């Protein structure tokens, strides 16, 4: 093994031992060259240093691999696609420092992938591709996500969040290498400082080993400054939505039918006192049921999120059955959908502007009945 001169020291029981650096080009995990680096990121998502990406955050990103070789655009494929518990997609391209593409080309490549992600992907596409990947490994995507994010993980609400962040280009792009050249480092720092919603980061992965059976990995993040961290954290903070703020957002929503219907329901909810406002990254408001808790949320992108948790219908349990029957009748839920055991809710199949005028009137009447209001007009 070639010794580059770099090394780390391990102190155990007052004894110090030196562990020399190991080049990824020497191979590991039964792989060699670039495959070694890619295998690390495929099998050990913990290598992505969430605590460095969101230093000081009480809930730094935890990463789950969705798929290796994720198709994007026409004939391209991304090395690795991850997602964190906040619904932010993370695109990772891996290159060895001696690969000529590890210079300017890889920056252009990952930016091109990100530029095509919104038009190529949505939550349905991503879930399908990721499910196929995990099936090939004898796992299910849902189990992988629940194991990583906890037993209270809400699958459907999570994918709604992924969709909304993808539409806002709220992405994280990472160029990973054994060594990042100075010219690439400068490009990463510049892009990360100038891009508003997208993070562009570099990740150097140093390896140390004195045998082939064990390995010390030391990931180091590149591209952040305290200024960019503070600014992008501010951009991602929850907003305290209220009637005035929502109307301003809704007035700019396209198509116009979506804008008009959201404003109509918001005006009615406020007039009847059944509105619920809560801090969130995305403009939305809720509607309370007869029992008090939220039974539905409406988003500026037209999505309708219905709550089926039995706790939300304590004083009127029959209203939950009514909601289910009516949403099925309006074809806002798939026939055969299982509602028992749902912890928080599901996103309806159709947006508010996707309903016919008659269906929209029926939907408003349904909401009025379930909230205890006498009229949706």
Image (cartoon, rainbow, N blue to C red):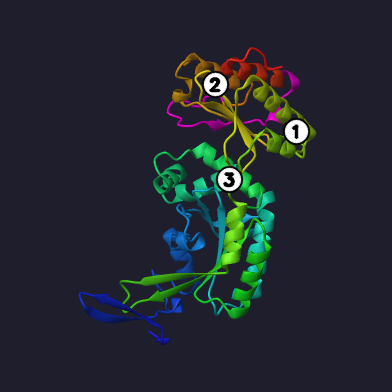
Q: x and y percent of residue 308 in the render?
A: 50, 26
Task: Give the residue displayed 75% in from the left and 21% down from the top.
Answer: 357
Q: x and y percent of residue 8 in the render?
A: 36, 79
**Where on the picture, by quarter, is residue 248?**
top right
126 above or below 17?
above
Q: Which mark is residue 238?
A: 3
Question: In the rendered structure, which segment of residues is drawn in magenta?
Answer: 335-358
Q: Nearer the viewer, mark 3 or mark 1?
A: 3
Task: Give the residue displayed 46% in from the left and 49% down from the top.
Answer: 134
In 3D space, how far apart are the residues under numbered discs 3 and 1 (Cα atoms)? 22 Å
Which comes before the other along the chain, label 2 or label 3?
3
**Can residue 200 be seen?**
no
Q: Which mark is residue 330?
A: none
Q: Residue 346 lies in magenta, yes or no?
A: yes
Residue bearing the label numbered 2: 289
Q: In the current view of this chain or complex, which residue is farthest to the top?
A: 374
82 above or below 238?
below
Q: Quadrant of the N terminus?
A: bottom left
Q: Judge by depth and name the residue closer to the eye, 137 or 198.
A: 198
Task: Give the residue displayed 63% in from the left and 75% down from the top.
Answer: 186
Q: x and y percent of residue 99 in the render?
A: 57, 77
6 horizontally vs 292: left or right: left
In 3D space, how far apart are the residues under numbered discs 2 and 1 (Cα atoms)? 24 Å
């Amino acid at each position: 093994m070639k010794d580059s001169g770099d090394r780390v020291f391990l102190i155990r029981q007052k004894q110090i031992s030196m562990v020399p650096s190991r080049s990824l080009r020497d191979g590991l995990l039964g792989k060699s060259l670039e495959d070694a680096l890619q295998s690390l990121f495929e099998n050990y998502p913990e290598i992505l240093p969430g605590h460095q990406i969101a230093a000081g955050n009480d809930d730094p990103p935890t990463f789950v691999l969705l798929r290796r070789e994720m198709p994007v655009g026409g004939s391209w494929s991304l090395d690795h696609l991850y997602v964190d518990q906040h619904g932010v997609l993370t695109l990772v391209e891996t290159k060895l420092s001696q690969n000529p593409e590890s210079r300017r080309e890889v920056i252009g490549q990952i930016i091109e992938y990100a530029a095509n992600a919104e038009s190529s992907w949505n939550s349905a596409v991503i879930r399908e591709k990721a499910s196929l990947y995990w099936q090939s490994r004898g796992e299910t995507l849902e189990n992988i996500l629940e194991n990583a994010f906890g037993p209270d993980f809400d699958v459907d609400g999570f994918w709604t969040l992924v969709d909304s962040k993808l539409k806002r280009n709220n992405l994280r792009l990472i160029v990973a290498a054994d060594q990042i050249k100075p010219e690439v480092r400068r490009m990463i720092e510049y892009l990360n400082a100038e891009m508003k919603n997208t993070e562009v980061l570099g990740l150097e992965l140093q390896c140390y080993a004195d045998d082939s059976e064990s390995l010390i990995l030391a990931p180091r993040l590149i591209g952040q400054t305290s200024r960019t961290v503070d600014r992008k954290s501010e951009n991602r903070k929850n907003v305290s939505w209220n009637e005035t703020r929502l109307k301003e957002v809704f007035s700019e929503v396209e198509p116009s039918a979506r804008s008009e219907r959201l404003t109509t329901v918001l005006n009615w909810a406020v007039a009847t006192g059944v509105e619920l406002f809560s801090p969130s990254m995305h403009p939305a408001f809720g509607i309370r049921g007869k029992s008090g808790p939220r039974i539905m949320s409406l988003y500026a992108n037209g999505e309708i999120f219905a709550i089926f948790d039995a706790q939300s219908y304590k004083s009127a349990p029959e209203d939950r059955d009514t909601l289910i029957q009516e949403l099925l009748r309006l074809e806002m839920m798939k026939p055969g959908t299982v509602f028992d055991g749902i912890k928080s809710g599901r996103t309806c199949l159709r947006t508010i502007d996707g309903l016919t005028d008659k269906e929209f009137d029926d939907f408003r009447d349904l909401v009025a009945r379930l909230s205890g209001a006498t009229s949706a007009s």
